[in-house]
Image (cartoon, helix red, strand yellow):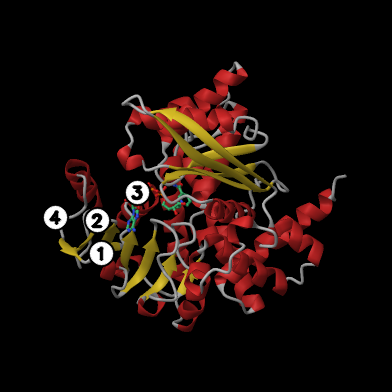
Amino acid sequence: MTLGDPMISEAPSALEQELNPWLAAEIRFNEAARRLNLDDGMRKILAMPARELTVHIPVTLDDGRIEVFTGYRVQHSIARGPGKGGIRFAPDVSLDEIRALASWMTWKCAVVNIPFGGAKGGVICDPRVLSDFELERITRRYTAEILDFIGPETDVPAPDMNTNEQTMAWIMDTYSMHKRHTVTAVVTGKPFDLGGSRGRSEATGRGCLIVSLQALKRLGKNPEDTCVVIQGFGNVGGMAAKLMARAGLKVVCIIEWDGAVYNKNGLDITKLMEHRKETGSITDFEGGENMDKDEAMFLGCDLLVPAARENVITSQNAGRIRAKILCEGANGPTTAAADEILADRKVFVIPDILANAGGVTVSYFEWVQDRQGFFWNEDLVNQRLEEIMVNSFDAIVEYARKHQVNNRTAAYMVALDRVAFAVKLRGIYA
Ligand code: NAD
């Protein structure tokens, strides 16, 4: 997969290799492909992204200076339908990261069996030091640069790290201005008033809750007796915390980049959200005690939900994880080397391509509703989401049992098999 790739032509160190998400994706891919006895040609097709676009976007900053930002959009596969995947804004975005995330989207859409391929985009920028006007100009210029690459039938972006409903509204508007008519289905995760779906903002967190409840049921544990630690209090982690607390689970610790807060009896998540809104931080919350954010992930708990970013559980720290269930709300929070350690420790892993697939599932519902011009109520969205998440969870866990592999390998095997089947049916054009 890495042959001829200029980004990684120099041999990386073992740790660099472990933390490179594209190489991590490659390890999981190779393992699943080997177990499926995928032939060489098919491996080559599925291993590389189909298309990669790099853009350098000039943007006028508020003080009049011009800055040039680099952005990417990668389509890993469109074998099962249009590309689908978020756009992230972060200082450490890299092409390798976007490639890995695009491939994970292919496998994720296949795991939950929705008719999309996989794509991802990102812009290297630091939203913390940019004003809303600057972010709008970056978003609009980035959209203009990738305009021919995206569309309801080709590639449908969504929010990801540091992007949100507003970002999607700007993308939709920019795209629509070029097309000379309103094209709501070009992105998902839009505000409801612009063709967004009910239940979309909660969907990834809700999906985490649904699969976690399934895992608890398998392990014979009551939700009321379940202690939860969540890393990241943004879209995924915040919603997962809110919904888990509402479902009766005890969310004892929330970890953010600037600190962690703990209450052994369970945190009041609504109050914590208000506290963060008022003060800008989760720390110094009167309903809990501050704790060392670097230690909090290793608290004894039943359920750990890393929902912030990738590479937080590595070969260096996996041995210290004391959770019984790991529900990967974030994409790629666990490195391939850490997988083996977690398996030895008998942690029940709900892999990212299943655990956080609730978001893309409701994105699919949003795309369907936009194209139909007919909108569903929230109960229907949640009911259809639950059906897909429960069926997918059962299918993966059953596959793992039948083939004596761990849940992650099972998820990859099911996904690769589905995508390979679609490629075979379509045949090779040319
Ligand atoms: P977000 O920006 O809304 O939230 C991320 C949160 O994590 C923020 O509150 C941030 O402050 C915090 N954070 C950042 N670095 C941290 C660190 N080192 N320690 C603790 N907290 C930290 O982003 P999001 O949309 O919630 O996405 C989080 C993860 O979930 C990403 O990996 C993303 O790819 C994945 N994901 C998101 C969705 C979705 O629907 N939003 C769907 C699937 C997967």
Front tag of 1 and 3: 1
View extreme (bottom): residue: 344
Q: Residue at label 2?
A: 258
Q: Is mark 2 within 8 Å of ligand 1?
A: yes
Cα gap from disc 3 to disc 2, whole angstroms? 13 Å
What is the secondary structure assignment of the residue under circle 4? Answer: loop
Q: Is mark 4 within 8 Å of ligand 1?
A: no
Q: Which amino acid is tagged 3? A: Gly
Residue at coordinates 27% horizontally, 71% vertically from top-left?
Answer: 295
Please name whichever residue, 414 or 297, is drawn nearer the observer in this view of the structure: 297
Please name whichever residue, 309 or 286, is drawn nearer the observer in this view of the structure: 309
Task: Give the mark nearer the N terminus: 2 vs 1.
Answer: 2
Relative to 373, does residue 352 appear above or below in the rendering? below
Q: Which amino acid is tagged 1? A: Lys
* Labels 2 & 1 near each other (Cβ < 8 A): yes
Task: Give the mark nearer the N terminus: 1 vs 4.
Answer: 4
Residue at coordinates 23% horizontally, 59% vertically from top-left?
Answer: 259
What is the secondary structure assignment of the residue under circle 3? Answer: loop
Q: Residue at label 4?
A: 284
* Labels 1 & 3 near each other (Cβ < 8 A): no
Quadrant in which the C terminus appears: top right
Q: Which amino acid is tagged 4? A: Asp
Q: Is mark 3 within 8 Å of ligand 1?
A: yes
Front tag of 3 and 2: 2
Q: Is mark 1 within 8 Å of ligand 1?
A: yes
What is the secondary structure assignment of the residue under circle 2? Answer: loop
Task: Give residue 140's mark.
Answer: none
